[in-house]
Image: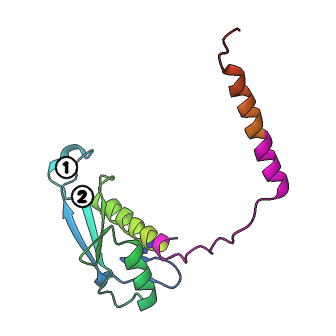
């Protein structure tokens, strides 16, 4: 699973993103932190330039760019982590999140659905329930006495 090995990001067995292709930015994080909450830059923004990456094969890059187009800004994917108190824990969380995003987006497309016809029994069941519902609704109708 996507884990941080050293500072590189292991997406799966075929794709490992080296540290030189990742850019980190640190800032102050909202939330818990005790005395250091206003002094420690524990929030992490991890940016990966997917469009310019040299480790992503062209076919995979096209699939990733297509599937992640809503999250990309100028071909760059940014992940933010600020849920932990320490910068190190947030760095690990951001790398894990980036690996999961890339792994999910790089998965091969599901096989196309084969069109099948409904069975005769299922069609008969559907018609029986439709008739039963119609009978219930017909019973609710108000009839004026003649």
Point out the residue furthest to the front here. Answer: 146
Residue 127 on the magenta segment? yes
Write down the region rendered in magenta: 104-128
Point out the residue furthest to the left here. Answer: 39
Question: Is 119 rendered above or below residue 14?
Answer: above
Categorize mark 2 by other alpha carbons within 10 Å: few (<14), some (14-19), many (20+). Answer: many
In the rendered image, residue 89, in percent from the top left (x then y), is placed at: 35, 60
Residue 42: give its label: 2
Q: Are marks 2 and 1 in contact (CB under 8 Å)?
A: yes
Identity of the residue drawn at 68% across and 27% down: 137
Residue annotated with mark 1:
36
Identity of the residue drawn at 32% across and 67% down: 71
In the rendered image, residue 115, in percent from the top left (x then y), is placed at: 69, 69
Q: State how the image is colored.
A: rainbow
Residue 49 on the magenta segment? no
Quadrant in the rendering for residue 120: bottom right
In the rendered image, residue 44, in percent from the top left (x then y), is placed at: 26, 63
Number of numbered discs? 2
Q: Secondary structure at mark 2?
A: loop
Question: Is 146 rendered above or below residue 113?
Answer: above
* Closest to the observer, 38 or 1: 1
Identity of the residue drawn at 38% across and 71% down: 68
Residue 126: give its label: none
Categorize mark 1 by other alpha carbons within 10 Å: few (<14), some (14-19), many (20+). Answer: few
**Residue 129 is at least partly visible in this image:** yes
Quadrant in the rendering for residue 110: bottom right
Quadrant of the drawing holding the C terminus = top right
Quadrant in the rendering for residue 133: top right
Q: Secondary structure at mark 1?
A: helix
* Closest to the observer, 142 or 6: 142
**Residue 6 is at least partly visible in this image:** no
């Amino acid at each position: 699973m996507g884990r941080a090995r050293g500072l590189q990001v292991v997406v799966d067995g075929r794709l490992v993103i080296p540290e030189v292709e990742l850019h980190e930015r640190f800032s102050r994080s909202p939330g818990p932190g005790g005395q250091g909450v206003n002094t420690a830059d524990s929030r992490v923004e991890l940016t990966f330039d997917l469009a310019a990456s040299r480790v992503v094969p062209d076919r995979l890059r096209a699939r990733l760019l297509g599937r992640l187009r809503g999250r990309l800004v100028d071909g760059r994917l940014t992940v933010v982590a600020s849920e932990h108190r320490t910068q190190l824990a947030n760095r690990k969380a951001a790398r894990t999140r980036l690996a999961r995003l890339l792994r999910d987006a790089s998965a091969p497309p599901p096989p196309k659905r084969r069109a099948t016809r409904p069975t005769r029994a299922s069609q008969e069941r559907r018609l029986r329930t439709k008739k039963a519902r119609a009978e219930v609704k017909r019973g609710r109708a108000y009839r004026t006495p003649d």
